[in-house]
Amino acid sequence: MAFHTAPVAPPGTPRTRRTVLKAAGLAALTATAAAVTAAPALAEDARPSEPYDVIVIGAGFAGVTAARAVRAQGLRVLLLEARDRIGGRTWTGTFAGEQVEMGGAWVHPVHPRVWHEIHSRGIPLVADDTPPDRLILPSATTGAYAPYDPATAGTRLGELLTDYFAGSETYFPSPHDPLLRADLLAEPDRLTLRDRLLQLRLSPQDEAWLAGHTATAGGSNTRGAYTALVRQLALSGDLATYNGLNTYRPVTGMTGLLTAMLADQPVTLRLASPVTTVTDTGTHVQVDVRGGRRHTARAVVVAVPANVWHTIAFRPGLPAEFTSASTAGIAVPHAKKIWMKVRGDVGRFLAQGAETGSPLIGVVPHTALADGSRLMIGFSLDPALDPAAVPQVQAALRQFVPQATVEAVRAQDWGNDPYARGGWSFMRPLQLTRQLRTLQQPHGRLVFAGSDIAAGWSGFVEGAIESGAHAARLALETATRTPARRRLLTA
Ligand SMILES: Cc1cc2nc3c(=O)[nH]c(=O)nc-3n(C[C@H](O)[C@H](O)[C@H](O)COP(=O)(O)OP(=O)(O)OC[C@H]3O[C@@H](n4cnc5c(N)ncnc54)[C@H](O)[C@@H]3O)c2cc1C
């Protein structure tokens, strides 16, 4: 995830908020989504439960996709979710009377699976493509932040990104198969985002501008892998698309979209069911939930974030790649998303913080409210910032706009969330070339899923859907491995 300074809408897609909201069916869709979201369990499979064919752990986009795909094949599936809601790192709520996304929000036509889910249901889109009136960036001459003309500064940032990616064009010739040219990745996959910045020998101002962008994407420049950002560019196809990724939202919110996807099949869902232990006996899998309840299945899809794997006891233990990926983390630590109600006419500014010393690494303008205030979205990677403390958030915002007054906040601290332990996925050096292949393979009767380990759009909802569908195929193979069962299913 990175917010971008120059949104560019692809041709043929709706462009204004007003136009898009006028699309038919809006009221019906939002009402349906709200009603279904409120239900504690969305649907119950009428047939006898245990043992299930497949248990899916985690009801984010990956887990729901996997559960739905397994159920669509006529198998019995149980979906276990730790929280009292579905959605994981997506979560639609309200703030200051407006619909807000506390996690993943934006979709794009280059995300074919999520785009299909939205369009096949006739869900209208909201386009967040009104350009900012100014870009606020670090100034090397004053040492403080200064406003810049968006067109001029956006052009310079584009040039810097072009230089940053120069030479990487051959790394991902087929971006959804990221290890196709693993031979070319051995050296670049060792580089951090910072290593690549140093290679460019930039002026202090260029360095400050580019380093803020790359740090936002990777959690920090010393943590994120250069290849992880190159993957995003390769998947985007060009820089204009890469810069326009954060443009469209489904009008139902991400929770409404996922609720509709789950309603496609009668999946048995149990909320408030944190899994503590997963035991693969060789013939089936026992899944223990906090509080003592045990469920069994022939195969299990583990669709919880990679950063959470090490909090679950797997018996027998997992291969070293899983332990290493989970303890180092694939999702960025300390990620926070903060909705701010800002008083007064601060305009539609977009701010990008410096790599260090900026509690808010980025601020994106949002809705202008009837009372004259404005909603803005802040992103933070600073472990010291309390995102719920209005004075702290206001002080951070005032680095960019000294007269800004924050009236209220609603924030989600994903790094401190026990069922996320991080924000958007962004691999560290060598996780791609040394770990990803193993993480995508079945391990006994277990298959792992999630945006963190997607082949394509890792770090996006699209990657979660892709990975969930892939895991479902593998789990179906495992669950139907006995000859008798195979005959039954193919009869
Ligand atoms: C701040 C932020 C902004 C983002 N912006 C965008 C964006 O604009 N566009 C985009 O496409 N993507 C964005 N992303 C990324 C996107 O949200 C994620 O890639 C995607 O939602 C991950 O889905 P998932 O199913 O892989 O994992 P998750 O959504 O994390 O789902 C995993 C599920 O497992 C559950 N779980 C965890 N532990 C247990 C347990 N022990 N037992 C049972 N259940 C458990 C969790 O509660 C959760 O529901 C953003 C992410 C963040 C944090």
Image: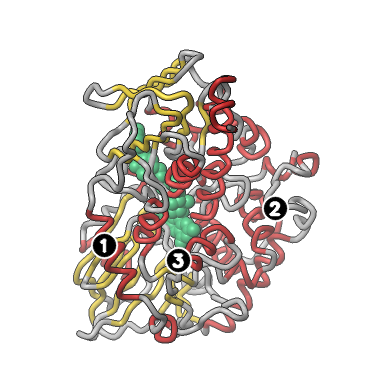
Mark toward the start of the polypeptide (3 vs 2) = 3
* Kind of residue at badge 2: Pro
Q: Mark 3: which secondary structure? A: loop
Q: Is residue 448 left or right of residue 50?
A: right
From this viewpoint, which residue is outermost toward the front? Answer: 491
Q: Where is the C terminus found, in terms of image quarters? A: top right
Query: Cα distance, mark 3 to mark 1?
Result: 16 Å
Mark toward the start of the polypeptide (2 vs 1) = 1
* Kind of residue at badge 1: Ala
Circles 3, 1 touching at the beta carbon (< 8 Å): no
Q: Give the numbered dot on residue 5.
A: none
Mark toward the start of the polypeptide (3 vs 1) = 1
In the displayed structure, 370 sits above or below 184; it is below
Give coordinates of residue 464: x percent, y percent: 50, 48
Question: Disc 2 designates what residue?
Answer: 175
In the displayed structure, 185 sits above or below 264; it is above
Question: Disc 3 designates what residue?
Answer: 121
Give coordinates of residue 160: x percent, y percent: 66, 68
Question: Disc 1 designates what residue?
Answer: 34
The mark total stands at 3
Give coordinates of residue 185: x percent, y percent: 74, 43
Q: Is disc 2 surrounded by few (<14), some (14 to 19) or many (20+) residues within 10 Å?
A: many
Asked whether residue 430 appears in the rendered view, the answer is yes
Residue at x 44%, y 16% (from the top left corner): 315
Q: Mark 1: which secondary structure? A: helix
